[in-house]
Image (tube, rainbow, N blue to C red):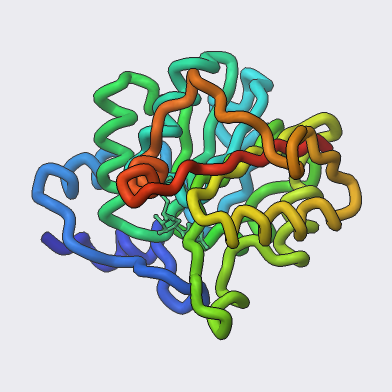
Amino acid sequence: MRLDQAFLDQYQQHELRTHGRKNGFVTKGQQARLEHWLPIIGLPRDAMLTSDDTDLTKRAAPWVLEIGFGNGDFLVHMAQTHPEWRLIGIEIYLPSVAKAVGRLEDAEVIDRCRISQLPAQFVLEQQIPEGFLHGIVINHPDPWPKLRHHKRRLIQPEFARLLVSRLELGGFIHLASDKPDLAEWMRDILNATPGLHNEGVEDGFVPRDDARPSTKFEQRGLCEGRASQFLQYRK
Ligand SMILES: C[S@@+](CC[C@H](N)C(=O)[O-])C[C@H]1O[C@@H](n2cnc3c(N)ncnc32)[C@H](O)[C@@H]1O
């Protein structure tokens, strides 16, 4: 099923450069849900997420961002466990956006979420004001294991500075990875980023929070014999 082009233009990226899969098949049912919900919760590419943005923000709630939310399980978990938060989720892969919209609607938490299918770098730079976010969650970003592809990894020194700039003072960044090489890469870059305090204990990592759900990629790592590692920072 293909979505209407004008609709795609408003909510999707085309020329914006990023690495990773973007488009793909969505079912008829998913298409109907996207067409219903994106005009309500989608963050159009020329909009700014500000306190006069929507009715949601008028409640002056803390905003928490998840980057690369995949099928949306962690977004649902955050919405259910933190009813005081508003959530903004960014995910470049359309079939994942479609799955997440379905899960958010089924869990009856969708009215507290906003969704963007543009690359996180663009949304953070262009659509989120400085000091706006209460927290940022990044679970299992793409590992890009080959040395020549390391520059495609999401966490880079410049991106880390951008994350910090969008956080309020006292705001948090939580990250997870099942790939030890990537976990250490993220830790080393974030440890070297001015304005961030690593709240980890051993080697800079925190123990797994038993209350968190296993995301798809945490489960995949476990099936392949890799326990995930977790990082926690405070601005
Ligand atoms: C390995 S998956 C992890 C999905 C989910 N967080 C989990 O733990 O199961 C990484 C996700 O990040 C998304 N992604 C990659 N680059 C991105 C970017 N620049 N902005 C937003 N999402 C991105 C991918 O489409 C993919 O769904």
Q: Quadrant of ligand 1?
A: bottom left
Numbered circles on residues, count: 0
Residue situated in front as seen by the camera: 125 or 73: 73
Q: Position of residue 226 (x, y in %)?
A: 44, 48
Picture residue at 50% right of the left edge, 43% below the top: 228
Q: Residue furthest front?
A: 225
Q: Quadrant of the C terminus?
A: top right
- Residue sticking out furthest to the right: 194
Above or below residue 99? Residue 142 is: below
Q: Is residue 70 visible?
A: no
What residue do we see at 32% from left, 62% from top?
8
Q: Position of residue 230 (x, y in %)?
A: 60, 39
Q: Residue at x 75, y 42 (%)?
A: 204
> Which image quarter holds the N terminus?
bottom left
**Which quadrant would residue 131 be assigned to in this image?**
top right
Residue at point 59%, 61% (across, down): 181
Tell me where residue 85 appears, x and y as whole percent. 58, 22
Of 169 and 194, the residue lying toward us: 194
Residue 158 located left or right of residue 106: right
Up/down of 231 relative to 160, above or below: above
Question: On the picture, is 94 further left or further right than 190?
Answer: left
Vertical position of residue 37 compared to residue 83: above or below: below
Q: Nearer the viewer, residue 90 or 224?
A: 224
Residue 36 visible in the displayed image = yes
The x and y percentages for residue 209 are 56, 24
Describe residue 124's horizontal placement relative to residue 119 as left or right: right
Which residue in the rendered view is the most extreme toward the bottom?
A: 148
